[in-house]
Amino acid sequence: QVQLVESGGGSVQAGGSLRLSCSASRFTYCMGWFRQAPGKEREGVAGITNDGATSYADSVKGRFTISQDNAENTLYLQIDTLKPEDTAMYYCAAGLFLNTGGRCANLRAWGQGTQITVSS
């Protein structure tokens, strides 16, 4: 069983930056970030494998950077140039495969989520 705890969300103005953290009891092969905006489906935004391969959704490429600290079992998501459309609940997830478009697949665990609200 993998436990995941996110932190780092908040309310920011457009153009600002945030760094999300996900503390994991352990890493699986693929660790990723998903988000869900009100009235929309949950979407993958970024994923990283334990050998360092990364994948991003087209909508966030160039603004989001996923990274991990293997010694601390902590996953990060650096978000720059925030836009109002980035407003969503952001979830950390642990999976077994990394697909294109930033989606970890065969998910084994989810965190509780951390909210990002971007005002224009």
Image: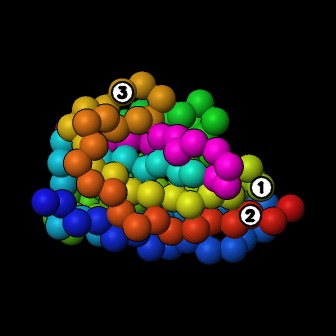
Q: In the figure, is residue 84 to the left or right of 17?
A: right
Q: Measure the alpha-carbon separation of dots 2 and 3.
A: 28 Å
Closer to the chain start, of discs 2 and 3, is 3
Query: Which mark, residue 84?
Result: 1
Q: Secondary structure at mark 2?
A: strand
Instruction: Identify the residue position indicated by label 2 in the image.
Output: 118
- Percent coordinates x, y for residue 56 in the rendering: 49, 35
* Residue sticking out furthest to the right: 120
Asked whether residue 120 appears in the rendered view, the answer is: yes
Quarter residue 13 falls in: bottom right
Q: Is residue 81 magenta?
A: no
Q: Secondary structure at mark 3?
A: loop
Q: Residues within 10 Å of mark 1 (few under 14, many from 20)?
A: some
Amino acid at pointer 1: Pro
* In this view, 63 is above or below 17: above
Magenta part of the chain: 37-53
Q: How is the rendered protein coloured? A: rainbow
Asked if the residue at tag 3 contacts the one at tag 1, i.e. Cβ–Cβ closer than 8 Å, the answer is no
Amino acid at pointer 3: Asn
Query: Which mark, residue 59?
Result: none
- Percent coordinates x, y for residue 20 in the rendering: 47, 65
Closer to the chain start, of discs 1 and 3, is 1
Q: Is residue 51 magenta?
A: yes
Instruction: Identify the residue position indicated by label 3 in the image.
Output: 99
Amino acid at pointer 2: Val
Q: Measure the alpha-carbon separation of dots 1 and 2.
A: 5 Å
